[in-house]
Amino acid sequence: MATIRKRGMRWQVQVRRSNGYRASRSFLLRADADRWAREAEAEADRRFLQTDPSQLAKLRLADLLKRYEASVTPAKRSAATERQFLAALLARPLAQLRLCDLTPRRLADYRDERLSRVRPASVLRELALLQHVLEVARREWCVGLSDNPCRMVAKPSAGPSRQRRIGAAEWSALCEALQRCRHPMLASVLRFAIETGMRRGELLRVEWRDLDAASRTLRIRMAKNGHPRTIALSDEALAALAGLQRSETDARIFPMTANALRLAWERLKRRAGIQDLRFHDLRHEAISRLFERGLNVPEVAVMSGHRDPRMLFRYTHPRPEDIALKLARCRVEDPMVPQRDDAARKEP
């Protein structure tokens, strides 16, 4: 049964069903509210008839998560990371819920409980994964879910984007620590990363055949967004590669694992006495420096691989003190401010 009530100058209609269906709308006229309520109830009944309640009572969320891990996850480049998220979801009580009991209210409770323990960004990733699992089950596996309950749950805000820049003193400390580092190629990796803005995964996958020293370019065949690109190399980037030895068994320019690079980076930071600096912050620093060198938005986008300017600007963090210096060097004549004529003021 639809619920119709007066709210101020409008009539509010709510239609709810035990299978998770929710719909609401407001109208100026009661007649319009009654007409829409009948249509919404008919739509709710049609959706309930398409659902097999017995199937939803037999299946649990864990069954969908396991099938997703076996059939969908292996085709992704981030399969290893996604398996970790799926394993964590399978270990939580939510996974043991029957699909008939998996309502937006249950998912909202799970969201709130997780927000009390981890950062909003982590909860966003978990909810996004759950939503995709349920959507694949509805559309491809013919699981009789009338709607995706996770789509109806409000997602937490990830908060402001990270704006970490590397100061001159910090970079000097890192360079000094690199001189005492025994890792054979960590210095080359860091200098190449700060000059190109490449992601860690891109750095560790690029091969010598992708390098064209004559044209000073590097081909990135596999990027995070699935779109390959060719970037330009500065003198400093080419110099970072000059001392590297080519491996006879590995075609990569930087033949090391992601875990080895992570451990070497953590040791370097401790040696340099630097905290709260992630390897991904080098990408933010590199993109900001490209803008400071005078490159325009399309040129920096070619280097970074961003296809959306809004995402590119999330990686660009101009220093306010640098902007102040530029303003000090620029002499802007304001027509509303009387201009001094220094020549006329000079005494004979």
Image (cartoon, grey):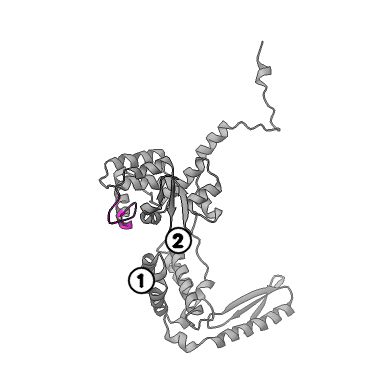
Give the structural element (helix, strand or loop) at label 2. Answer: helix
- Which label is found at residue 76? none
Tell me whether the residue at label 1 lies in contact with that at label 2, contact meaning CB atoms closer than 8 angstroms: no
Q: Is residue 89 magenta?
A: no
Point 67% across, 33% down: residue: 334
* Sequence-wise first label, 1 or 2: 1
The N terminus lies in quadrant: bottom right
Give the structural element (helix, strand or loop) at label 1. Answer: helix
For the residues labelled 1 and 2, the Cα–Cα distance comes to 18 Å
User: Mark 2 = which residue?
Assistant: 121
Which amino acid, mark 1? Answer: Ala
Note whether 129 is above or below 248 in the view shown. below
User: Mark 1 = which residue?
Assistant: 87
Which amino acid, mark 2? Answer: Ala
Point 40% across, 44% down: residue: 237
Query: Which one is in front, 194 or 40?
Result: 194
| Magenta residue span | 246-260
Find residue 47 and report its horizontal and vertical position in percent. 57, 84
The C terminus lies in quadrant: top right
Note whether 139 is above or below 318 in the view shown. below
Point 40% across, 75% down: residue: 71
The answer to whether residue 25 is seen in the rendering is yes
Find residue 308 and report its horizontal and vertical position in percent. 54, 56
Q: Is residue 258 magenta?
A: yes
